[in-house]
Amino acid sequence: MHLVNEPRDAHRVPLALELATAIGLALMTGFLFNMSVVTAPALNALSPEQALAAWKGINATVHNPLFSGTAFEPQCWLSCAQPLPGIRGFENWCLGFALLYVVGVICTTFAVETGIDRAIVPATQPPPKLPGMLSTWLLGNHVRTLSALAAFIVAWLGFRRSPSDR
């Protein structure tokens, strides 16, 4: 419902915030998808020694500020916008996409991937359970990919709600 003389888009989330959130979520979804359908199968095709070296290389490369900022910030970009006066339901979809991202991506990263990486990174020889570790890692990455995609969709739907519904 609009008040008299109120601009139609007065209660919209700022475009810059929408873009930052959407871009961050889309980048992470694409990155995680790539890890599931390209990187993990390529690691599986390598000898254990080559897979260990490649895994270590990936871990060394991925630990940088640009990746960390992209991976760990999308769920926070909208929190700086709260509360936006007049946007009913904003908190619900914001909480929805943030929970999908935090639980599905970040918590899965720390619960599954981080533990495996801690066993892999210091190893000088391929662990005997390397194929099983890679399978577990891949399953966790599928969860992260689907969670990031779901978070993107929930955020996008929230942004796309018509201003008259807000």
Image: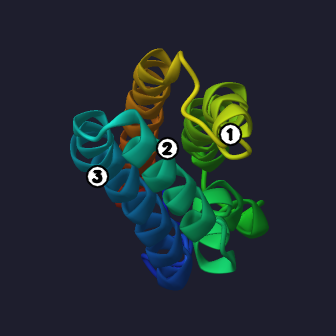
Q: Which residue is mark 1?
A: 123
| Disc 3, SS | helix
User: Label 3: few (<14), some or many (≥20) within 10 Å?
Assistant: some
Residue 61 position (above or below residue 150): below
Q: Is residue 45 visible?
A: yes
From the top left corner, tell me how far across and down residue 131 is, in percent: 41, 21
Q: Label 3 near label 1: C-beta < 8 Å?
A: no
Q: Which residue is mark 3?
A: 34
| Disc 2, SS | helix
Q: Nearer the viewer, residue 58 or 103?
A: 58
Q: Residue at x 42, y 71 (%)?
A: 23
Q: Earlier in the sequence, mark 2 or mark 3?
A: 3
Q: Label 2 near label 1: C-beta < 8 Å?
A: yes
From the top left corner, tell me how far across and down residue 162 is, in percent: 35, 58
Q: Residue at x 40, y 65 (%)?
A: 27
Residue 63 occupies quadrant: bottom right
Q: Earlier in the sequence, mark 1 or mark 2?
A: 2
Residue 8 position (above or below residue 133): below
Q: Amino acid at mark 3?
A: Asn
In the image, is 69 to the left or to the right of 79? left
In the image, is 47 to the left or to the right of 136? left
The Cα atoms of the two marked residues, 1 and 2, are separated by 8 Å
Q: Residue at x 67, y 46 (%)?
A: 121
Q: Amino acid at mark 2?
A: Leu
Q: Which residue is mark 2?
A: 52
The Cα atoms of the two marked residues, 2 and 3, are separated by 19 Å
Q: Residue at x 46, y 15 (%)?
A: 132
